[in-house]
Amino acid sequence: MSDTANRAAIRRLPIWSGPIEIAPLSGGLSNANFVVEDAGRRRVVRLGADLPFHHVFRDRETAVARAAHAAGLSPAVLHAEPGITVFEFVECTACTAADVAANWAEIVPLIRRCHGEVARHLVGPAPIFWVFHVIRDYAATLSAAGHRLVRELPRYLAVSDLLEAAQVPLPIVFGHHDLLPANILRGADRYWLVDWEYGGFGTPLFDLANLAGNAGFGRDAEIALLGAYFGDDLDPALLKAFDAMKAASLLREAMWSMVSEIHLDAPGADYVAYTAENLARFERALGQFEETIR
């Protein structure tokens, strides 16, 4: 929807006590977000339709966001209807990659709590996230659309199969699966996790690899991250699986952007540039993984 239509939809919500003031929140690549002031109270309003090409369904996202709040990880959902969700406003700033790299030890407890507690509060169908399925489905979407990089798809699929084969058995947990720095908010005395579009059951290794890959961790930080989560006695097979998962995470992010080139048009978003950025990061991560199997 246009900005005018978004603002009109917000004003029509039945929850306001009187006249409201609406200000945009920047940064959304697939949603429109606003801060609304109503009688001296601020709320965050998120507008977004279902995105089946990205496996995003807003009713599931809302259910997961409610569970995440119950687990103490995310602001409260105050109102939800098709295409619009209203959240409690919390004083915070979105993290940068440098913030995450410097303060990851304070973020790991949130990831642990996500993995251990969100599912206890979830009501309704259980979402699942398996990055290798997502890559295969994205490839099918891109092939059908004749995307400009369609000739690269056979290689991406072959690499994905190799990365999937490197995975090791781990407990199934409930993960966030989109740990971009901007989805981690820093308040005065705590961190929050937001944007639960891809929340679902999966492997704990994805969130760890996703966090490290998106924030550009060096090798020492990656080892420390894995040690903080799994313990210091790290199996070489686990390290190999982590390197593979990091490459898969970055390939998925690049293919997310390729699909978005076709289907999305968020104001200010440069999907072609985002594709190029993440493909470059994927190739570096793939090179690191290939070093481990030589």
Image (tube, rainbow, N blue to C red):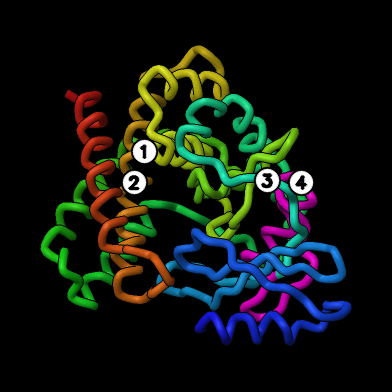
- Residue shown at 52% from the left, 13% from the top: 232
Q: Amino acid at mark 2?
A: Leu
Q: Amino acid at mark 1?
A: Lys
- Residue shown at 24% from the left, 49% from the top: 279
Q: Amino acid at mark 3?
A: Cys
Q: In the rendered structure, which disc, 4 or 2, sits on the residue that comes first in sequence?
A: 4
- Residue shown at 38% from the left, 37% from the top: 167
- Of the pair 80 and 53, the residue shown nearer to us: 80
Q: Is residue 84 magenta?
A: yes
Q: In the rendered structure, which disc, 1 or 3, sits on the residue that comes first in sequence?
A: 3
Q: Secondary structure at mark 1?
A: helix
Q: Is residue 288 magenta?
A: no
Q: Secondary structure at mark 4?
A: loop
Residue 86 lies, with reference to residue 190, above or below; the image says below
- Residue shown at 61% from the left, 33% from the top: 107
Residue at the spot of label 4: 71
Q: Secondary structure at mark 3?
A: loop
Q: Residues within 10 Å of mark 3 (few under 14, many from 20)?
A: some
Cα separation, mark 4 vs mark 2, equals 28 Å
Q: Tell me where the magenta segment starts and ends, as one range.
A: 60-85
Residue at the spot of label 1: 246
Q: Amino acid at mark 4?
A: Ala
Residue at the spot of label 3: 92
Q: In the rendered structure, which disc, 3 or 2, sits on the residue that comes first in sequence?
A: 3
Question: Dots 1 and 2: beta carbons under 8 Å?
Answer: yes
Question: Dots 1 and 4: beta carbons under 8 Å?
Answer: no
Label placed on residue 90: none
Residue at the spot of label 2: 250
Cα separation, mark 3 vs mark 4, equals 19 Å
Cα separation, mark 1 vs mark 4, equals 27 Å
